[in-house]
Image: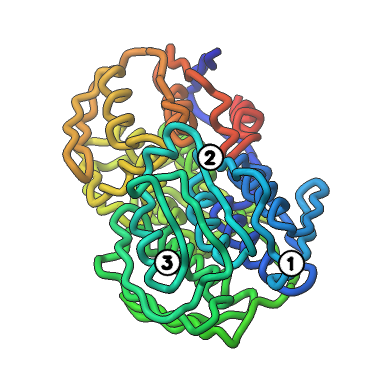
Amino acid sequence: MNELIEPLDTISATVKIPGSKSIANRALITAALANGTTKIENFPLAEDCIIMLEALKKFGVNINLHNDTLKITGNPDFLRAPEEEIYTANAGTVMRFLTSFSTLANGMTILTGDKRMLERPIGALAEALNNLGADVNTADGFPPVKIRGKKFKGGHTIINTNFSSQFLSSILLSAPYAENSVNISVKNSIPSRPYVDMTLDVMNNFGVRVHSDSSSFYVDNKVFYKPIEYIIEGDYSSASYFILAAMITRGEIKLLNIKENSKQADAKILDIAKEMNCVVGKIENGIWVNAKNVKIKAMEIDANNFPDLVPTLAILALFADGKSKIYNVAHLRYKETDRLEAISNELRKLGVDVVEFPDGIIISPQKSYNGVEIETYNDHRLAMSFAIAGLRISGIRIKNPECVKKSFPEFWKEFKKLY
């Protein structure tokens, strides 16, 4: 199955953005560990969030979901290892966050996933947890992961986050329930640092303050999560595709369920839009982006802190006034696919001059592009970004369009509002 994208001269539309799956999966872990009932609103029905929700139920966590409101009752003293293996598909946050979470459950937990998940490294997380007294075993540094619970002693550990900052977030989220306080040192610069800050912010909202500086984190084992009422804010990764749509068609877009002043890494797209002469304003329950006078400039962008924007920026670069370079994103090679290679492959099919290097890409825009079928590699971000490209490039067809369900199940419904 593929989705044929019809080109448009310009857009003027209103779309609704889902809650952030990154925030939601962090909130699910903290709520599952809080002793009592937490109410979460604007919960996204993204596939990754549903996988996390169903997995937590198997640990004995009581969860009720009605529309986009979730009630979750946690009790950390009664967590039990699931009787069967937990299948995480290709959900990185689920595999990684549950690796630490499972150290708190009584019994043996086995976490596995699909073919791509079994290729994504997790050895550095296992090693860091074992240095804290845990009993975590991997298949030569890759899933499946076997965790024998009730052995999270605490203490000091050193972690390598080169592959993913989620390794650090994983330990932080479960650290308040270790037998002793936890002190984590990071031995490299942290990729996607705003996502670690997001973890700290969620923990703080649930009552646990982490003492941290640029490379060390201290979690007191005497302070625990409290059940609260919590609203998941709208997802800027999802919003970026529609901001891109406005920019490449010189149109305007109203984004509901999104706030202008967000700490999310991908809110960087607003800064980029403003730098290119777009007007951004607040509306009721959202923001408005007017790109009628946009000037899409060649970019040289260090995207280390906002790697999920790279597919969006790659499409934007097709319509820039010169050659663009996006760099310092080597960790994209360990996402749902090798995202740098996948983007480069599909851009070349369009007729783009692309230079791929270990941590980035250089994109030279052309006067015209080929209308081709886009291979998505089962990567939701490629599907959505290249769909937007189809608004300007005639003949674009998106293969496996349903892969958007990973983060934005309603994407195609909202996309059709552009017409």
Residue 244 on image: x %, y %:
44, 39
Which of the two discs, 3 and 1, sits closer to the camera? 3
Residue 301 on image: x %, y %:
25, 50
Going by the image, does 37 lie left or right of 53?
A: right
In the orientation shown, which residue stands out farthest toward the bottom? 222
Lower position in the chain sequence, tag 2 or tag 1: 1
Q: Amino acid at mark 3?
A: Leu
Label 2, residues with CA under 10 Å away: few <14, some 14-19, many ≥20: many
Which of the two discs, 2 and 1, sits closer to the camera? 1
Going by the image, does 89 lie left or right of 37?
A: left
Circle 3 is placed at which residue position? 129
Lower position in the chain sequence, tag 2 or tag 3: 3
Rendered-image quadrant of the C terminus: top right
What residue lies at 54% left-to-right and 29% top-to-bottom? 403
Residue 132 on image: x %, y %:
42, 73
- Judging depth in this view, the residue of 259 and 358 nearest the camera is 358
Which of the two discs, 2 and 3, sits closer to the camera? 3
Circle 2 is placed at which residue position? 252
Specify the color scheme: rainbow
Q: Amino acid at mark 2?
A: Glu
Vertical order, 275 against 332 (above or below)? below
In what element is the residue under mark 3? helix
- Judging depth in this view, the residue of 85 and 7 nearest the camera is 85
What residue lies at 48% left-to-right and 54% top-to-bottom? 96
Circle 1 is placed at which residue position? 74
